[in-house]
Amino acid sequence: MPLEIERKFLVKDSGFKDMASHRVDICQGYLSRVPERTVRVRRLDDKGFITVKSKNTGAVRYEFEYQVPVEDALEMLRMCEPPIIEKSRYLVEYDGLTWEVDEFHGAKEGLIVAEVELQAEDQPFNLPPFIGKEVTGDPAYYNSNLG
């Protein structure tokens, strides 16, 4: 089963933008926000995805993600519980890892969160200079709770 091992941090400044290799605009909603199993629908530019995630145990959880036709994703987004989240994601390579930095728009304008996926929960890594407080495991920063 696919495991996601992820650490999450607040971002303290916009220096990540100069370091980013790519930016994508994301629109996402939730068909289920039940903490034990969230079901997310996303449109990333011209692609669609559906993702099922289990509840976190520390920085670890099960994640199943499948690409779907973008037209299907757009239709499923209409079925999602409000609110729909809009954000820009910046990809930043730093010290051999890819950091995903999400800059939220709309009601959460000003919130910027960075995530890094790891191979093991105890994997050592260096923090990029724009990283602030760690919020891994804090439900207030789960995308399913933002809106």
Image (cartoon, rainbow, N blue to C red):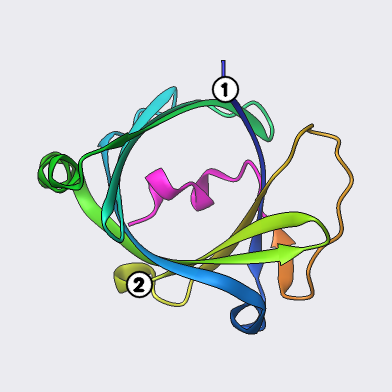
Disc 1 residue crowd, few under 14, some 14–19, many 20+, Cα 10 Å: few
Q: CA distance from mark 2 to mark 1?
A: 30 Å
Magenta segment includes 136: yes
**From which residue to which does the magenta span run?**
135-147
Amino acid type of disc 2? His
Q: In which image quadrant can residue 146 be found?
A: bottom left
Looking at the image, tell me whether mark 2 or mark 1 is earlier in sequence order.
1
Nearest to the eye among marks 2 and 1: give it: 1
Q: Label 1's element?
A: loop
Q: Image height check: is 98 above or below 79?
A: below
Question: SS class of the residue under badge 2?
Answer: loop
Q: How many marks?
A: 2
Residue behind mark 1: 2
- Whether the magenta-drawn stretch holds residue 113 is answered as no
Where residue 46 is drawn, which disc sits there? none
Residue 21 location (% of width, % of height): 59, 72
Q: Residue at x 78, y 69 (%)?
A: 128
Q: Which residue is mark 2?
A: 105
Looking at the picture, how far across and down is residue 142, in whole percent?
49, 46
Tell me the quarter of the picture where residue 57 sits: top right
> In this view of the protein, which residue sits in the foreground, 44 or 9?
44
What amino acid type should be assigned to the residue bearing mark 1?
Answer: Pro
Q: Is the C terminus in the top left, top right, bottom left or bottom right quadrant?
A: bottom left
Q: Position of residue 116 (x, y in %)?
A: 67, 51
Going 29% across and 50% down the picture, which residue do you hit? 47
